[in-house]
Image (cartoon, rainbow, N blue to C red):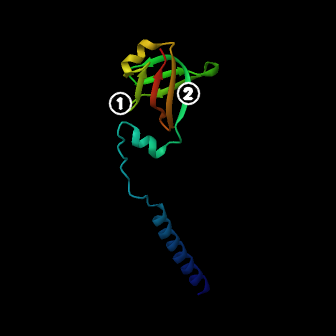
Amino acid sequence: MRKTIVSLLASIFLCALAGTTSVIAKQPAEQKPEKAVAGEKKAKATAAKPETIIGSVVMVVKEEKLLVLEGTGGVPYNFKVTPATQIKVGEKKGNFDDLAGLINKRASVKFVPVREGNLAQSIEIQP
């Protein structure tokens, strides 16, 4: 009789434990990612404070909308350029295509580091 009661209590305990673990193991409802408007909302929501770096333009990758800047000590930095990125060449407003002809020019990039990479907010090229 005593074994039966102990077995019954153990079974109840295990059933209760299994029931709570199944409740714990349930995943929350899947959330749809928020669409970023030109990368700005995403940068504001997930990023640290904007930073600025000065260096020389080394490369422009048109397919990926990427600007590579060589900073102090020859360290390369990659920046994603979006439609929201403000580009200034000298005193004139520029665009991404203008950057390809400015290799080895001095540039200042204000950017926000995000998980996907450095998101350029503004690029100023010195003539």
For the residue labelled by badge 2, is the local secondary structure a helix, a strand or a loop?
strand
Residue 38 placed where, x, y %? 36, 36
| The furthest residue to the right | 73
- Neighbour tally class for label 2: few under 14, some 14-19, many 20 plus, Cα within 10 Å: some
Q: Is residue 84 left or right of residue 118?
A: left
At a point 48% along the width and 16% down the height, the residue shown is 59
Q: Which of 13 and 121 lies nearest the eye of the viewer?
A: 121
Residue 93 placed where, x, y %? 37, 23
Relative to residue 71, is residue 2 depicted above or below? below
| The furthest residue to the front | 91
* Amino acid type shown at disc 2: Ile
At a point 38% along the width and 52% down the height, the residue shown is 31
Q: How many marks?
A: 2
Relative to residue 61, is residue 2 depicted above or below? below
Q: Are marks 2 and 1 in contact (CB under 8 Å)?
A: no
Q: CA distance from mark 2 to mark 1?
A: 20 Å
Residue 108 placed where, x, y %? 51, 24
| The furthest residue to the bottom | 1
Location of residue 30 (image quadrant): bottom left
Q: Which of 77 and 101 lies nearest the eye of the viewer?
A: 101
Residue 72 placed where, x, y %? 62, 21
Q: Which residue is under mark 1?
A: 83
- Neighbour tally class for label 1: few under 14, some 14-19, many 20 plus, Cα within 10 Å: some
For the residue labelled by badge 1, is the local secondary structure a helix, a strand or a loop?
loop
* Amino acid type shown at disc 1: Pro
Q: Which of 60 and 89 lies nearest the eye of the viewer?
A: 89
Q: Which residue is under mark 2?
A: 53
At a point 38% along the width and 57% down the height, the residue shown is 29
Q: Is residue 3 left or right of residue 127?
A: right
